[in-house]
Image: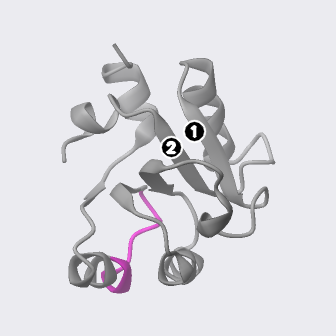
Amino acid sequence: MELKEIMQHNNFVVVGNTILEDKYAYKIKQGLLEKGYNACGVYKELNSINDVPFDIDILDLCINPILGLKFLKENNKHIKCVVIQPGAESDEIKAFLTENKIDFIEGCLLVGLKLYPKQ
């Protein structure tokens, strides 16, 4: 899936610190909400991806790769695509996603919000 297609989905989950304003996870979640997307945070808001109260289109990893992999392994929900933000990537995450046939890209949702706003 390409970033342009990802930005046409509606339900986003940002895994990272979405509470502190200086964190990228916060900026991403707020940017999504401001543009009319449905978005919530996992880590400081919800404890698990499984706690998300809606179907997940896009999961955005904006967290230390070790924690990101932990959240992914605990997850039981269907995810259409995972976006791995710069700094959140690891060979283990990519191997896990590939083995579990979960589509993913390495990219930045802040760029996606600027270039491909929801139509």
> Where is residue 85 drawn, in percent x and y?
43, 55
Where residue 30 sits: x, y (%)? 66, 31
Q: Which residues are magenta?
A: 86-93
Provide the secondary structure element on which disc 1 rests. Answer: helix
Mark 2 surroundings: few (<14), some (14-19) or many (≥20) residues within 10 A: many
Which mark is on residue 65? Answer: none
Residue in the image at 62% along x and 20% along y: 34
Q: Residue at x 22, y 77 (%)?
A: 98
- Count how many numbered circles sit on residues in the image: 2
The amino acid type, in three-letter code, at marker 1 is Ile
Marks 2 and 1: CB-CB under 8 Å?
no
Answer above or below: position of 105 versus 118.
Answer: below
Q: Quadrant of residue 78?
A: bottom left
Read off the residue under disc 2: 12
Secondary structure under the numbered disc 2 in the rendered image:
strand
> At label 2, which amino acid type do we have?
Phe
- Distance from label 2 to label 1 (Cα)? 10 Å
Q: Identify the residue at horizontal 72%, vertical 49% (top origin).
A: 18
Q: For this view, does 59 lie left or right of residue 15?
A: left
Left or right of 21 in this view: 119: left
Question: Camera-side residue: 102 or 17?
Answer: 102
Q: Which residue is mark 1?
A: 28
